[in-house]
C-alpha cells in the first residue's frame, strides 16, 4: 500500500522487469516523500577509476593484462616464468593482489622486476581504485603491466581495472567443467591459459571437452596450453603478448 | 564477500545522491539485477543492512527487480530469452547467441524522505 495516499500498489511486486510506476502523481506539500530516479550502474564508480587507469596506460604505452584464476591455479608461477623469458625484450611491472602477505610480490622482485603488492584484507577482488594507487608506486613506460588478481573466479569478472585484456588461467588439476561453472569469468576474458599441462599424463583431464566448454561460454576466446614448469607452449603465449603490444603501437600511431 | 563490496558501492552512490538531490532518508532502494551479474541475492540483502548502517539508507528496504536474460541469435536473428550464457537459441538451436540483457547491476530509483 502506498503510504502517501493509501492507493493499492499491486504492480509493485518484484517478479519481472516490468516498470512499476504509480500511474498517478501525488499532490506535493503534505510530505517530502518522493521518488528519485537514479538509473546508475552500481559499478559506475569503479568504472570511472578503471577509465582513468586506462588513460594512464594509453598515455604511457603500457599493455595492461589482468590475470584471474582460482587460488593455486598457478598465476604467480606463470608470471615469474613469463617475466624471466621476456624481460629482455620489454620493460615490465607487476601488481600483485592477495588478501594477505607480500609473498607473491617478493617472488616477482626476485626476478628483478618491479612489483607492488596490494593486500585486500577481506576483499575478494582488486578494484580500479586500488590499482590506480598501486600505479603511483610504479614507473613504467612502453612496456607491459601484469596484474595478478586475487584468486577467485567470481567477482574479479565484474571489476574492470582498466586492463586491455583479462587473461583467465585454468589448471588441469581443476576439472574441465570450470568454464561452465564460472561462465562470467570465461566470458569476460579474451585469453584462457590452460596451465600445468605437464601433469596431464597423471590425470583424467579431458582437454577437448574443457576447450569446448570454454568456447561455448565465449566463442572468441583465445586458448593456449602451457606449462610454465617445463616451458611447453609458452612461446605461443609470448607471441600473443607481442602481437597485442604491436597492435597497441598501431592504435597509438594511427 | 563480493556482495558486501557491491552494497558498499550502492551506499556510496546513494550518499552522493543524498547531497545532490537533498534528501535525508531513504525508504526503499530499487535495483535492477540480471542473473548474469554474478550476484547472490540472499547475500546481497544480508550485506545491505550492514553496509547501510549509520547512513541515509539505514533501515531502507532493498527491492530487487530481476531482469531476464535476453540474447540475439546470430543465426536466426531473433531476440530470445535464455537461461545461461551458453544456452542454445530456443528457436533454431544455434549456440551463436549474443547476450544483450541479463548483466544489469543498476540502481533504478529510490523512495526518499
Ligand atoms: N606441475 C606443475 N605445477 C605447477 C605449475 N604451475 C604452478 N604449479 C604449482 O601450483 C602451485 C600454485 O602455484 P601459484 O603460482 O602459487 O598459484 P597462484 O595462487 O595462482 O598464484 C604451486 O605449488 C606451484 O608450484 C606447472 O606448470 N606445473
Ligand atoms: Mg599468486
Ligand atoms: Zn569480490
Ligand atoms: Zn536462433
Image (tube, rainbow, N blue to C red):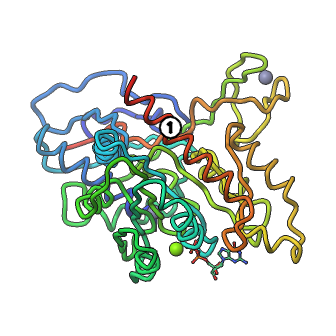
The answer to whether A26 is drawn above or below residue B38 in the figure is: above
Classify mark 1: residues with Cα within 10 Å, few (<14), some (14-19) or many (20+): few
- Residue drawn at (48%, 64%) of the image: A148
| The residue at label 1 has a CB less than 8 Å from ligand 1 | no
Secondary structure of the residue carrying tag 1 is helix
In this orientation, does residue A2 appear? no
| Closer to the camera in the image, A53 or A61 | A61
Residue A181 picture location, percent across and down: 71, 58
Residue B83 picture location, percent across and down: 70, 41
| Closer to the camera in the image, A126 or B84 | A126
Q: Is residue A47 left or right of residue A36?
A: right
The answer to whether B67 is drawn above or below residue A101 in the figure is: above
| The C terminus of chain B sits in image quarter | top left
| The N terminus of chain B sits in image quarter | bottom left
| Quarter holding residue A232 | bottom right
- Residue drawn at (55%, 45%) of the image: A242
Q: Is residue A239 left or right of residue A52?
A: right
In this orientation, does residue A215 appear? yes
Residue B95 picture location, percent across and down: 79, 33
| Closer to the camera in the image, B72 or A105 | A105
- Residue drawn at (57%, 53%) of the image: A167
| Closer to the camera in the image, A98 or A155 | A98
| Quarter holding residue A229 | bottom right
Q: Is residue B43 left or right of residue A34?
A: right
The answer to whether A50 is drawn above or below residue A136 in the figure is: above
| Quarter holding residue A209 | bottom right
Q: Which residue is mark 1?
A: A246
Q: Most extreme residue toward the top, as rendered?
A: B77
- Residue drawn at (79%, 34%) of the image: B88
Quarter of the image where ligand 4 sits: top right
Amino acid at each position: 500500500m502506498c503510504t502517501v495516499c493509501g492507493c493499492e500498489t499491486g504492480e509493485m511486486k518484484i517478479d519481472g522487469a516490468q516498470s512499476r510506476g504509480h500511474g498517478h502523481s501525488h499532490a506535493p506539500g503534505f510530505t517530502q516523500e518522493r521518488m528519485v530516479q537514479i538509473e546508475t550502474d552500481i559499478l559506475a564508480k569503479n568504472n570511472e577509476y578503471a577509465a582513468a587507469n586506462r588513460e594512464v596506460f594509453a598515455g604511457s604505452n603500457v599493455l595492461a593484462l589482468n590475470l584471474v584464476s582460482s587460488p593455486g591455479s598457478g598465476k604467480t608461477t606463470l608470471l615469474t616464468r613469463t617475466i624471466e623469458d621476456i624481460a629482455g625484450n620489454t620493460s615490465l611491472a607487476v601488481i600483485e593482489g592477495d588478501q594477505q602477505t607480500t609473498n607473491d610480490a617478493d617472488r616477482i622482485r626476485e626476478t628483478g622486476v618491479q612489483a607492488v603488492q596490494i593486500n585486500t584484507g577481506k576483499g575478494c577482488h582488486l578494484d580500479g581504485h586500488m590499482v590506480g594507487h598501486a600505479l603511483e608506486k610504479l614507473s613504467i613506460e612502453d612496456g607491459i603491466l601484469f596484474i595478478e588478481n586475487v584468486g577467485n573466479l567470481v567477482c574479479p569478472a565484474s571489476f574492470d581495472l582498466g586492463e586491455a585484456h583479462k587473461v583467465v588461467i585454468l589448471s588441469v588439476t581443476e576439472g574441465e567443467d570450470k568454464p561452465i561453472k564460472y561462465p562470467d569469468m570465461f566470458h569476460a576474458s579474451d585469453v584462457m591459459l590452460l596451465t600445468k599441462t605437464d601433469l596431464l599424463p597423471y590425470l583424467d583431464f579431458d582437454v577437448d571437452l574443457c576447450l569446448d566448454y570454454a568456447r561455448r561460454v565465449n566463442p572468441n576466446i583465445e586458448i593456449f596450453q602451457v606449462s610454465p614448469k617445463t616451458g611447453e607452449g609458452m612461446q605461443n603465449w609470448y607471441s600473443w603478448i607481442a602481437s597485442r603490444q604491436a597492435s597497441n603501437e598501431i592504435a597509438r600511431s594511427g | 564477500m563480493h556482495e558486501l563490496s557491491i552494497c558498499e558501492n550502492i551506499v556510496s552512490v546513494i550518499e552522493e545522491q543524498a547531497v545532490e538531490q537533498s534528501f535525508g532518508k531513504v525508504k526503499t532502494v530499487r535495483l535492477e539485477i540480471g542473473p548474469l551479474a554474478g550476484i547472490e541475492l540472499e547475500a546481497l540483502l544480508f550485506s545491505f543492512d550492514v553496509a547501510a548502517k549509520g547512513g541515509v539508507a539505514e533501515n531502507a528496504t532493498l527491492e530487487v527487480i530481476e531482469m531476464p536474460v535476453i540474447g540475439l541469435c546470430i543465426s536466426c536473428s531473433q531476440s530470445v530469452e535464455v537461461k545461461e550464457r551458453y544456452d542454445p537459441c530456443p528457436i533454431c538451436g544455434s549456440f551463436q547467441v549474443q547476450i544483450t540483457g541479463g548483466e544489469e547491476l543498476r540502481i533504478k530509483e529510490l523512495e526518499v524522505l
